[in-house]
Amino acid sequence: MTAVQTPRARSLEFGAFFNTFVIAVTAFLTVVDLFATQAILPALAVHYGVAPSAMGVAVNATTLGMAISGLGVALFSARIERRTGIMASLFALAVPTFLLAFAQDLLIFTLLRVVQGVLMAAAFTLTLAYLGERCSMRAAAGAFAAYITGNVASNLFGRLLAAGLVDHFGIATNFLVFAALNAAGGVLVYFTIRSAQGGGARMMAAAPWAALVTHMRNPALRVAFAIGFLILFAFIGVFTYINFVLVKAPFAVTMMSLGLVYFVFLPSIITTPLAGRVVQGLGARRAMWIGLSVALAGLPLLLAQFLPLVLLGMAVVAIGTFFAQAVATGFVSSAASADRGAASGLYLASYFLGGLVGSFVIGQAFDRFGWPAAVAGVAIAVTLAGLLAIGLRTPKTSQ
């Protein structure tokens, strides 16, 4: 017989679902600008009259701001009240996003993207710290997976929206709409995230650098930071420059169709939430190997001359990298012995620095040697991350 749920059980179940939904939507509105602009890279390159690699670095300049911000939040995390910090960052993020609609040259565009990155990472890092501090160890993996799922959704729907807006209304309108979405994130946080009680985020007793030094002395955390670097290195290397491949022969994909291409992220919305369960069952190390192996398996398909095979390869790479990111993000929180905000900040600083380096290195390979060389560079990064994953061991996750 099926057990009948009590009203309290149903209320708790709904509350858990609602919290998961809010976590995912907050993530969506935090980083929706980050990768959406990649879907309009060819249009931006034409608009500013620059080479693909130059436009790729400018668009991904957000990762420089995110790396700087991640380090800053790591230093001062314990002094920042979570709700206030997240909300202020999202409201402020709307300003540079709005100004991008009127950027006259590539330098101004790039600087505004850096500012966007600073504010995105502040909201992102503080949210991860909030989750790590508010969730039980058992619930934490699911909460982090929900947050990364919102990140995945922003990759899909953000790109679709950007491509459609630019195709029908132009580049300026695109950024105005995304500024409104950032502000909506601040409103959501205001109504859904509770302020810390009983001191919440405590003041640091020691110098701000002390927490960073402590985390950097932890071998497992150092490994996780390096893997994060390589994950975004690989992801940006693929999903920045494949846009330029798709708009040329033999594919000749139109701007609107280029947005539709990113339905390849749809499977990741389903698979990424499973990362928490896999970590609980197999441990972080084996879960990371699963994600990276999947990503590696998709790379050869990116070299096909048949569009459905390329799309399949993109979907497989996305599944693997998002899964690996969810594993790494949760691992950092569980492996940190204290001040999880600082640990999350260091992880994200490394993660986003990897994105900036990846956009430059893979961009140079793409410009000089073509798409096969770019894919080979990504494969090396994924393989190295898999080797480093041997070191993902803590007393709680050791396998």
Image (spheres, grey):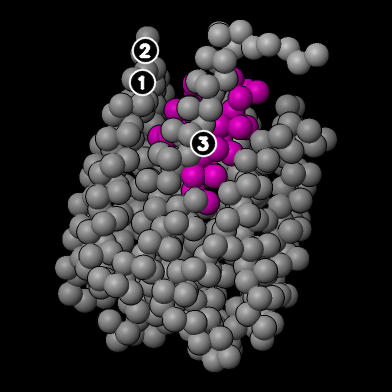
Which residue is tagged 3? 343
Residue beneath the point at 69% across and 75% down:
309
Q: Earlier in the sequence, mark 1 or mark 3?
A: 1
Q: Quadrant of the N terminus?
A: top right
Pointers 2 and 1 in contact (C-beta within 8 Å): yes
Q: Position of residue 49 (x, y in %)?
A: 30, 86
Q: Is residue 259 above or below residue 52?
A: above
What label does residue 307 carry, if any? Answer: none
Quarter of the rendering containing residue 375: bottom right
Which residue is tagged 2? 197
Kindly identify the amino acid type of the residue bearing the numbered disc 1.
Arg
Closest to the observer, 216 or 183: 183
Q: In this view, does 366 lie above or below 200?
A: below
Residue beneath the point at 40% across and 35% down:
126
Kindly identify the amino acid type of the residue bearing the numbered disc 2.
Gln
Which mark lies nearer to you, 1 or 3?
1
Specify whether residue 363 is in view.
Answer: no
Mark 2, residues whose alpha carbon is within 10 Å: few (<14), some, or many (≥20)?
few
Q: Position of residue 219 (x, y in %)?
A: 67, 40
Kindly identify the amino acid type of the residue bearing the numbered disc 3.
Ala
Which residue is tagged 1? 194
Pointers 1 and 3 in contact (C-beta within 8 Å): no
Quarter of the rendering containing residue 26: top left
SS type, badge 3: helix
Q: Does the magenta stretch include residue 134?
A: yes
In space, the residues marked 2 and 3 are separated at their CA atoms by: 22 Å
